[in-house]
Image: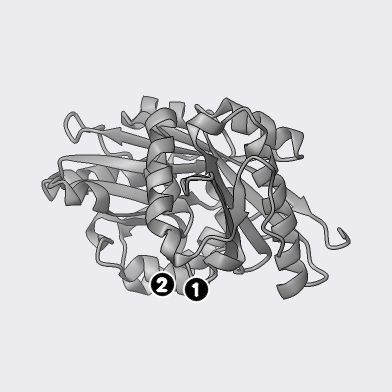
C-alpha cells in the first residue's frame, strides 16, 4: 500500500501509537465543524483498531503535527463494505488535501477488496453532517449519491400522547423468544438490492444482550403471533455517564406489508410510557430512513424534536473495476 497522498504533508500509515494524536486532531476539527460525533460513533465501529495500519493514512507537517487523516472501516458482514472516515485540520483546508485523502481511500478500498474479496463489488460509504456542505459536494463529484438519512431526536417525558390501538395487531413487551424472528423481520424491513443493510446474527444478539438494553422499554407488534413490527430501546450510555437516565430507541421497523396503519406510532407511544414509568429524564430515538420527511412525522405524532442529522452517501465499485 502506497501511503503517499499529496505534496503538502508527510504521509504514512497510522498506528496504535498515533491514536492520541488522532483524538487530538479530531477534537480540533470538531471545534470548528461541530459534527454529530455521538451518532457517528454509534453507526461505525471505530473501537476496532486491529487493521488500523493496513487501512489508514495520516499527514504530518514538518514539525510532527498530525493535520489530516483517512481511515477505512471495513465491514465484511454480507457484501464487502468500507466506510470512509477522515478529516483535515481547519488551518490546512482549501488546499485539495481532503479530496486527495478521499481518492486515496477509494484506491485503498479497492486494493482491500482485491486482496480479500476478489471478483466481488465493494460498497463505499461516507457519513456527512448536514452542516458539511463542502464534503457532500466533493463526494458527489467522486460519484457518491445520498442513500440514507439519520436523525437524532429527543423529547421530554411529560404530556405524553394517548396510546393508539391498531385493529388486528397485538402489542406486547419484548421477550428473548422474539429475538430470532425479529432479526428476520429487521432484515426484511431494511432490505436493499445489494444487502448492505443486512444484520448478522452475532451483531443482533450482541445488541439484545448488552448491559444498556432494556426489554421493559422494548415492544413487539404481532399479527397471528407473527411479529410485524418492533421498537427496541435501551439506556443512552453517553448521557448516563453525565448522571442522566435517558431512554434511547435505536431500532424501529414495520414489515412493508403492514405499513401505513400506525403500528410504529403505537409501538413508540408504549416505549415513551415505559420510560416515563421507570423515571427516565427524557427519551431519544435514532431515525434511519430513506425519506427525509420522517422527522416531521415523528414530531407531529409523538413530539420528538430533531437535534442532529447525518446523510449516508455511497457508491458501489463493481467487481470488474481494475
- Left/right placement of residue 106 relative to residue 31 reads right
Nearer to me, 4 or 235: 4
Nearer to me, 292 or 236: 236
**Which image quarter: residue 1?**
bottom right
- Left/right placement of residue 77 relative to residue 270 reads right
Q: CA distance from mark 1 to mark 2?
A: 6 Å
Q: Quadrant of the C terminus?
A: bottom right
Contact between labelled residues 2 and 1, with CB atoms less than 8 Å apart: yes
**Which image quarter: residue 264?**
top left
- Left/right placement of residue 226 relative to residue 317 reads left
Element under disc 2: helix
Q: What residue is at 41 percent from the left and 72 percent from the top?
A: 205
Label 2 Cα crowd, 10 Å radius (few <14 / some 14-19 / many 20+):
some
Is 289 above or below relative to 1? above
- Measured from the top left, where is residue 3 in percent x and y? 67, 58
Is 1 above or below relative to 241? below
Q: What residue is at 44 percent from the left and 39 percent from the top?
A: 262
Element under disc 1: helix
Q: Residue 205 — which label?
A: 2
- Read off the residue under disc 1: 201
- Measured from the top left, where is residue 99 in percent x and y? 68, 38
- Left/right placement of residue 162 relative to residue 76 reads left
Is residue 251 at all visible to an observer of this figure? no
Is residue 189 at all visible to an observer of this figure? yes
Amino acid at each position: 500500500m502506497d501511503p503517499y497522498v499529496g505534496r503538502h504533508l508527510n504521509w504514512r500509515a497510522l498506528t496504535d501509537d498515533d491514536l492520541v494524536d488522532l483524538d487530538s486532531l479530531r477534537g480540533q476539527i470538531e471545534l470548528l465543524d461541530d459534527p454529530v460525533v455521538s451518532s457517528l460513533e454509534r453507526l461505525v465501529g471505530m473501537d476496532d483498531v486491529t487493521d488500523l495500519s493496513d487501512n489508514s493514512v495520516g499527514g504530518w507537517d514538518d514539525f510532527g503535527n498530525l493535520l489530516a487523516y483517512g481511515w477505512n472501516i471495513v465491514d465484511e458482514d454480507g457484501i464487502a463494505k468500507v466506510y470512509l472516515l477522515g478529516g483535515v485540520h481547519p488551518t490546512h483546508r482549501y488546499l485539495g488535501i481532503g479530496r486527495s485523502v478521499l481518492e486515496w481511500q477509494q484506491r485503498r478500498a479497492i486494493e482491500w477488496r482485491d486482496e480479500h474479496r476478489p471478483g466481488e463489488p465493494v460498497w463505499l460509504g461516507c457519513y456527512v453532517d448536514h452542516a458539511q456542505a463542502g464534503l457532500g459536494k466533493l463526494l458527489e463529484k467522486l460519484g457518491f449519491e445520498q442513500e440514507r438519512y439519520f436523525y437524532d431526536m429527543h423529547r421530554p417525558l411529560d404530556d405524553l400522547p394517548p396510546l393508539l390501538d391498531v385493529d388486528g395487531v397485538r402489542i406486547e413487551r419484548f421477550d428473548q423468544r422474539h429475538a430470532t424472528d425479529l432479526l428476520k423481520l429487521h432484515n426484511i424491513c431494511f432490505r436493499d438490492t445489494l444487502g448492505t443493510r443486512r444484520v448478522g446474527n452475532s451483531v443482533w444478539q450482541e445488541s439484545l444482550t448488552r448491559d444498556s438494553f432494556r426489554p421493559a422499554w422494548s415492544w413487539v407488534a404481532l399479527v397471528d403471533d407473527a411479529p410485524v413490527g418492533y421498537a427496541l430501546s435501551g439506556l443512552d450510555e453517553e448521557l448516563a455517564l453525565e448522571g442522566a437516565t435517558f431512554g434511547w430507541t435505536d431500532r424501529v421497523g414495520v414489515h412493508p406489508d403492514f405499513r401505513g396503519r400506525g403500528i410504529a406510532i403505537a409501538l413508540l407511544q408504549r416505549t415513551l410510557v415505559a420510560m416515563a414509568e421507570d423515571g427516565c429524564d427524557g427519551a431519544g430515538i435514532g431515525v434511519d430512513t430513506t425519506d427525509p420527511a420522517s422527522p416531521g412525522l415523528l414530531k407531529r405524532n409523538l413530539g420528538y424534536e430533531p437535534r442532529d442529522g447525518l446523510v449516508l452517501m455511497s457508491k458501489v465499485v463493481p467487481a470488474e473495476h481494475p
